[in-house]
Image: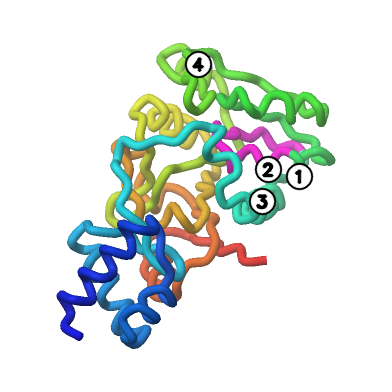
């Protein structure tokens, strides 16, 4: 089968399923795994798909943003693993920033027995923080309905009153050349400010965020430590040249 024919089959499968696995393509084309990996790499360079762990998915629009409800159940087990590891970095006496987001939300249950102070711009975090008796400061600002994040000039001014031992950020994508990104420039600005006020900055991103690029840049890769899941060996090798990466698989 010619390369162009395989590419057409791969794109047709994506059109039908949105996300496909290597095994789906191998069974349909009878090509080897190494051949399919090369095909996916080439199609990604052409911006026709995005590679994910074990397969590929359709390229997302850079301004696309899901609501907090839509994101809350996606890749939940990965998010819990990432959050569990992130919480182990937190020490008694730390002042930490918890960014709005569904992965950062999962850290809160693991903080219950730690003596910490939390600052957040995430409205969805409040009930969990209060329930566990964690000392919490909420930034002011404009409520963004889609993500329940506080943004805008008031939020930025409020944030600048604090200094953090550790900052935990959520992102919509990370890429070796384009860094950490998110669809909304105002949310990106909040993340930038928070990271500039922290001794240590961590980005929490499940495997679906790899090689994704959104509209607004937050930081370069080397400006934060990445905590993620399920990265292929070649990708991990390239990433570790730019930043510290912790891959959480257990």
Does residue 115 show up magenta in the picture? no
Find disc 2 in the rendering and name its residue.
107
Between residue 202 and residue 22, name the one nearer to us.
22
Mark 2 burial class by Cα count in 10 Å: few <14, some 14-19, many 20+: many
Q: Residue at x 53, y 40 (%)?
A: 71
Q: CA distance from mark 3 to mark 1?
A: 10 Å
Contact between labelled residues 1 and 2, with CB atoms less than 8 Å apart:
yes
Q: Which mark is residue 110?
A: 1
Mark 3 burial class by Cα count in 10 Å: few <14, some 14-19, many 20+: some
Q: CA distance from mark 2 to mark 3?
A: 8 Å
Contact between labelled residues 1 and 4, with CB atoms less than 8 Å apart:
no
Q: CA distance from mark 4 to mark 2?
A: 22 Å
Q: Nearer the viewer, mark 3 or mark 1?
A: 3
Q: Which residues are magenta?
A: 93-108
State which quadrant residue 232 falls in. Answer: bottom left
Secondary structure at numbered mark 1:
helix
Q: Nearer the viewer, mark 4 or mark 2?
A: 4
How far from the left and from the top, in percent, is residue 142? 47, 13
Image quarter of the C terminus: bottom right
Find disc 3 in the rendering and name its residue.
80
Does residue 96 show up magenta in the picture? yes
Task: Identify the mark nearer the N-term, 2 or 3.
Answer: 3
Secondary structure at numbered mark 4:
strand
Find disc 4 in the rendering and name its residue.
143
How far from the left and from the top, in percent, is residue 205? 51, 51
| Above or below for 172 versus 20 | above
Q: Nearer the viewer, mark 2 or mark 3?
A: 3
Q: Is residue 183 visible?
A: yes
Q: Residue at x 46, y 12 (%)?
A: 154
How far from the left and from the top, in percent, is residue 156? 45, 19
């Amino acid at each position: 089968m010619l390369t162009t024919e395989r590419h057409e089959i791969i794109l047709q499968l994506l059109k039908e399923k949105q996300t496909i696995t290597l095994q789906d393509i191998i069974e349909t084309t009878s090509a080897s795994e190494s051949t399919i990996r090369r095909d996916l790499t080439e199609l990604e360079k052409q911006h026709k798909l995005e590679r994910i762990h074990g397969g590929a998915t359709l390229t997302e629009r850079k301004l696309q943003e899901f609501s907090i409800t839509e994101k809350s159940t996606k890749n939940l087990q990965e998010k819990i693993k990432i959050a569990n590891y992130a919480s182990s970095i937190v020490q008694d006496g730390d002042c930490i920033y918890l960014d709005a987001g569904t992965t950062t939300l999962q850290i809160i249950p693991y903080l219950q027995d730690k003596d910490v102070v939390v600052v957040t711009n995430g409205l969805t975090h409040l009930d969990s923080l209060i329930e566990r008796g964690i000392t919490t400061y909420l930034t002011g600002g404009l409520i963004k309905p889609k993500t329940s994040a506080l943004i805008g000039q008031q939020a930025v001014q409020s944030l600048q009153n604090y200094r953090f031992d550790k900052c935990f950020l959520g992102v919509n994508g990370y890429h070796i050349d384009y860094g950490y990104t998110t669809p909304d420039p105002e949310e990106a600005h909040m993340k930038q400010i928070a990271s500039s006020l922290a001794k240590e900055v961590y980005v929490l991103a499940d495997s679906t965020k790899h090689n994704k690029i959104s509209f607004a840049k937050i930081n370069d890769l080397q400006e934060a430590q990445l905590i993620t899941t399920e990265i292929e060996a070649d990708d991990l090798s390239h990433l570790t040249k730019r930043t510290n990466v912790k891959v959480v698989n257990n």
